[in-house]
Amino acid sequence: MAHSSFSAVDEYGFERHDDFDFESYEEFMSVYLKVLASRAQKWAVLLGEGKSVKRTNTIKRYVRKGVPGEHRPSVWMAISQADKMKDQCPDLYQKILDSPFEKELVDLVKTDLPRTFPDNIYFSKEANHQAHLFNVLIAYAHNNRAVGYCQGLNYIAGLLLLATKSEETSFWLLKVLVEKILPDYYTKTMDGLIVDIEVLSELVKSKAPDVHQHVINLGLPWAVITTKWFVCLFAEVLPIETVLRIWDCLFYEGSKILFRVCLTLIKNNRASIMACNDFTTLAECFKAIVKNASALHCHEFMQSIFKVPGTLSNSTIIKLRARFAKQRREQLQKEPR
């Protein structure tokens, strides 16, 4: 294999394993670096005029085409309106860290620290990101008692730290995600997550009925396929740059983006899914589709999520969520206590 000019560690600190396809990556980066340079220039003009980032159609268009890494902390805070939450309580994060912690929460968080991005050099025991991650997660656990600490939040907070390089910004972005953008994914009963997996199943049924039926026939539950997709917001699922591009849109447009990504992955890989003829092959196929070249080519992938699924309105998602939440409540009432 030809020698690659790319390092064995990516710009976010993730190690590239022996099976990493440097050739495909070089091909992708040769195009994507030009895109990044062009977008950086446009954002510099937009932000260089001293304008604050407001939610406008121009900003929405810019966000869909990608927020440059250096602007992500401030842009994410603005477009998600986490900055408004912070303005109401500017000292909250430091006050929580200065208060005593509950041992039970400390133990829970500490258990997951070594499991978070073990292949990232910044999260090794020698590096200090584990300490930063502990601070963000323990502060959030004390701030939101209904959630406390839930597995999956470690990956989200960890990636927020890598993207923003700030504990406090990561805390506020985690707070806006859990409390405003995602509906009850991380509560003890995970009602919002269970409902959204049903919503996705229904969307696949209407937009790719043959795939939906095939998955049912082979007996693989959608929850097995997609729980990690939803809980980790594709962190530890899709390539890192693709995840950050998804998060750009998630902070602006809300959780509808997650359905667009899921549907695009499923529809783009329809032929591979339909070719599977048993449970095990299908499970392996769903692991493979999140690692293939189309998922790596983040710019084209992000363009496709607004085309491939077709029309997907907020009102459709709201109606489906209400329907499946009602079914879930009725089902829980029937179960013996």
Image (cartoon, rainbow, N blue to C red):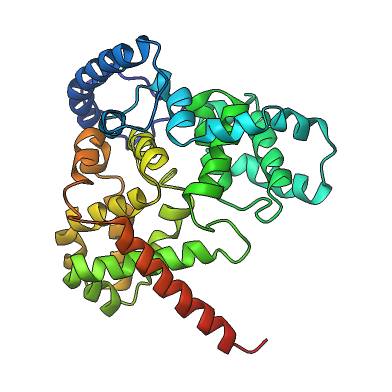
Percent from the top left, x then y, of residue 310? 17, 55
Which of 77/131 is in front? 77
Percent from the top left, x then y, of residue 69? 39, 22
Name the quadrant of the N terminus: top left
Q: Is residue 326 above or below residue 238?
A: below
Q: Horizontally, is 53 left or right of 93 in the view?
A: left
Which of 109/69 is in front? 69
Percent from the top left, x then y, of residue 105? 75, 48
Q: State the image quarter where residue 126 is shown.
A: top right
Q: Is residue 128 above or below residue 262?
A: above
* Residue 14 at least partly seen: no
Name the quadrant of the C terminus: bottom right
Which of 72/244 is in front? 72
Q: Horizontally, is 229 left or right of 25 in the view?
A: right
Residue at the spot 18% in from the left edge and 26% down from the top edge: 27
Residue at the spot 83% in from the left edge and 47% down from the top edge: 103
Q: Horizontally, is 21 left or right of 156 in the view?
A: left
Q: Is residue 144 above or below residue 267?
A: above
Percent from the top left, x then y, of residue 107? 76, 47
